[in-house]
Each structure stands twice: as C-alpha cells, then as structure tokens.
Image: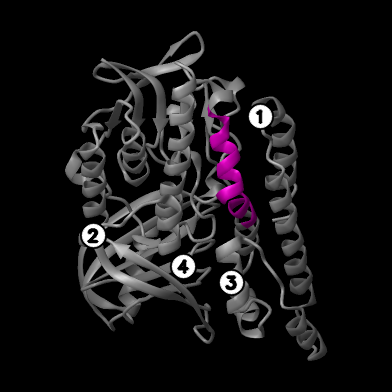
Amino acid sequence: MEYDVIIVGAATTGAVAAKKIAEKGFKVLLLEAKPKSRIGDKACGDAIGEEDLKKAGVNLPKEVIRERILGADLLSPDKKTVFRIKGYGYTVDRLGLGKVLVEEAESVGAKFMDNFHVDSLLLNDGVVRGVKGKDEIHSRVVLDASGNKTRLRGLLPDEWGIEKVIEKKDAVAAYRVIIDNLNPPLESGYLKIFFDQTRSPGGYIWAFPEGKLSNVGLGVTMVGKYPNPKLATHEWIKNVYTGTILTGSGDTVPTRRPFGNMVGNGIALAGDAAATVNPVTGGGIGSGMLSAKLVSESITQALQNVDAPKIDDLWSYNVVYMKTYGIKQAALDVFRRFLIRLNDDDINFGMSSGIMDEKTVTDAAITGQVKINLRKEAEIVLKGLKRPSMLLKIKQMADDVKTAMQIYSDYPSSFREYPEWNKRAEDFFNNLPY
C-alpha cells in the first residue's frame, strides 16, 4: 500500500503533523522506533508555553498537565540577583502527552506502527518515494521528525542543500531527573533557572515544578572538556535538595538557528531533526509543534497540486517558518553564542548592574531582539565601574542580533535564490567573534 505521507518519528512533532495531515483526508503512516509506551521519553524540562500551543493550533489535553506555569525565576551565579519573568504555560507528563497525541492522530485516520526502524530512503529519479526498514513502504512524501539523532539527513543528496551534521558547539548535552518529595519545595507555578558556568558551562541548571513531582536537570554546551551532565546533575542536587529520585535520562539537543533549508524532493524535516529548538532555553516542544503545523500546511497544499512534490513545491514551508520563528531563532543563536563566552562574574555584573534587566530578557524571549538599557549604561559608566570592555561587547552583540534578524527577514522565496542567501548567512555566523 502506498501512503500519501510517511512520518518518521512519533513524538510531539511527528504526532501533531500526522493528525493535521490526516484530518485533510490524506493517507498517513506514523512510524516510531520505540515501543508506543516509551514515546515522549526524553531528557527535557517538560515545559511548554501557552502562546506556543496557540500558534501551533494544539489543545493540550488536561490529563497530561502537571502544573500551570505563571513565570520563571532566573538566578545569577552568586544568587544575589533574581529576575522574575512573566509567562504562561504548563509542565506536562511527557509520556502521557506522547500517548495522547498518537491516539489523536489515529482517531482521524492516521495509521501508527511502533518498533519500526528506518534504515534507508527509497529514491526514484531523484525523489524520495518511501522508506525501508523491515519492509519497504512507499509514499508521495516523507516527513523526518525523528529527532536530533536522525540518520535520514545523511542519506540525502548534497545538491539539495540540507545540512547533514549538527556540530557539537551547536548542541547541548542534558540530563534530568524526576524527584518526589523535593525539599526545599519549589514555589508553585514558577520555573527556576540557575546560571552557573562552572557546573553547567554554556547552559543552565533547572528546577521545574510538576505538581507533586519536580523536574531537575542540567545542560552543558558540548565544547572542550565539558562536564558529564549526569554526574554534574546528581552532584548539584546533592548540595541543594533532598528527595526521592524516581527516574533519570539524558539526551543531546540542537541549540542553534534552524537549518537554512528543510525540504528536498519528496522529503521535509521538522522539529529537532531540522534544529527548530530555542537556542537559548533549549525548549523544543512548542517550536516542534509549530514546525509540525507549518510543514503540514505545505505538504497538504503540495499534494493537492502534484503527485510527487519536489523542493519548489514544498519551499513555502521554509519561507513561512523563517518569518514565523526562524528570525527569532537566528537572533537567539547570536545571543547564545555571546552568553557561552561569559564567566560567572560577567553574568553577575550584567544582571546586578541593570544592563540586562527583566525587560531585556523578556523582550529577547518573546521577539529575539536584545535591547540595551542605555540609561542604565550611562549610570554605570558614570559610577566608574571597571567593565567598559563588557559594555562594548554587549553593544556589539545587540548590533549582531539586528543583522541576523535582517538576514533571515530576507529569506529567499525560491530554491533558485537559496545558495546566494545561504552563503550570506553562513559568512555572517562564521565570522562572529564569539
């Protein structure tokens, strides 16, 4: 049997896409390498923003919500400065969410198959027409939603311009545990994020409330001799909290701008497989769902027009994604690369001096823009504080953020124009001083 669309990977991105495409009347096969009971089992903070759900057009089932989130507290390394950032969302039961989303896709006609490992792609005249695992299964389009460690990118022709490897410097190694009876308990409704460049270089430590449970973890940028995230997580918890650890898991997460091109002949990429994660927070549930929505719209439109969609037929996904979220991702990638180079003293100064205040952080989180508080800057200079070089670096970073956003605002409307644009983008990011 030939399907209209085969989706590889049944976690949040893949399951949401399966439902949206099947609702339009297309034959969809959702494949997953794990058993159904383990879908959603991932090292993650389990948090998703309310606005992200609205943009993705996803209604979060009540039974998977563990806690209503009202905001987040960001703590400086010395713990002397705390930013309380307002923002609504939820922490969720990831395993429960995975199960519900797959069942919703099945309810509208998508077929689900677990324990299916995709070994290769079926190509016919330069177009992907299915997948091969224990069986060959044919389709008109394949959607790769199999995550950061996908093998499928490496099988694609170079001329399609889809990146095949995410460099270690653009990824975070993370580990998290679920704890019962955490003491001292977390404040209900508020995420806690700790900056600590010694224990979590280039990343952060988190403690998120999940109803009666708590999600505590740590992420480190994979550069140089970075700490083992599992050992670092357990060591940090031992010094801060007590409680009963129920489960623990680790993973790697892409933390960079999105792939410049996410489509090929008969194939598209979404979620972690296309690097759609927020570069600063490492959060990927909401952005993965958004990419699922946008790629579904492009695929269904293309299938209505042609039998075997090619790059140009699917290109609208790139264009809409870049304007909707890619611009913000590019800006936050600049911000991330700047933050990685800071030490604990730099972060303490930036937060305590007011140069980086709650409004600056909130604006960056919502829009990707970094706006420097010039009035505070003048006050700091007049007080004679001895960090003029840092002030200059912050101003340079803010200018670089604007440039990145302009580049992604100029994203090309066709694949023919893509190579020139991609060179411009790559030259900019490769020449950043951080």
Residue type beneath disc 1: Ser
Residue type beneath disc 2: Val
Report which quarter residue 142 is drawn in: top left
Q: List x then y, in percent, for residue 122.
A: 39, 15
Visible residue check, residue 228 = no
In the picture provided, is 31 more to the left or to the right than 196?
A: left
Is 311 a magenta residue? no
Residue type beneath disc 4: Arg
Q: What's the CA distance linking mark 4 and mark 2? A: 32 Å
Point out the frontmost of discs 1 and 4: 1
Point out the frontmost of discs 3 and 1: 1
Check residue 64 in the rendering and tell me which mark sits there, or answer none: 2
Q: Is residue 4 above or below residue 404?
A: above
Is 329 a magenta residue? yes
Point out the frontmost of discs 4 and 2: 2
Q: List x then y, in percent, for residue 421.
A: 72, 36
How is the structure coloured here? one colour
Q: List x then y, in percent, for residue 271.
A: 44, 43
For the residue labelled by badge 2, is the local secondary structure a helix, a strand or a loop? Answer: helix
* Disc on the earlier residue, 3 or 2: 2
For the residue labelled by badge 4, is the local secondary structure a helix, a strand or a loop? Answer: loop
Asked if the residues shown at circle 3 and circle 2 are in contact, with their CB atoms under 8 angstroms apart, the answer is no
> For mark 4, what is the residue?
199
Check residue 361 in the rendering and tell me which mark sits there, or answer none: 3
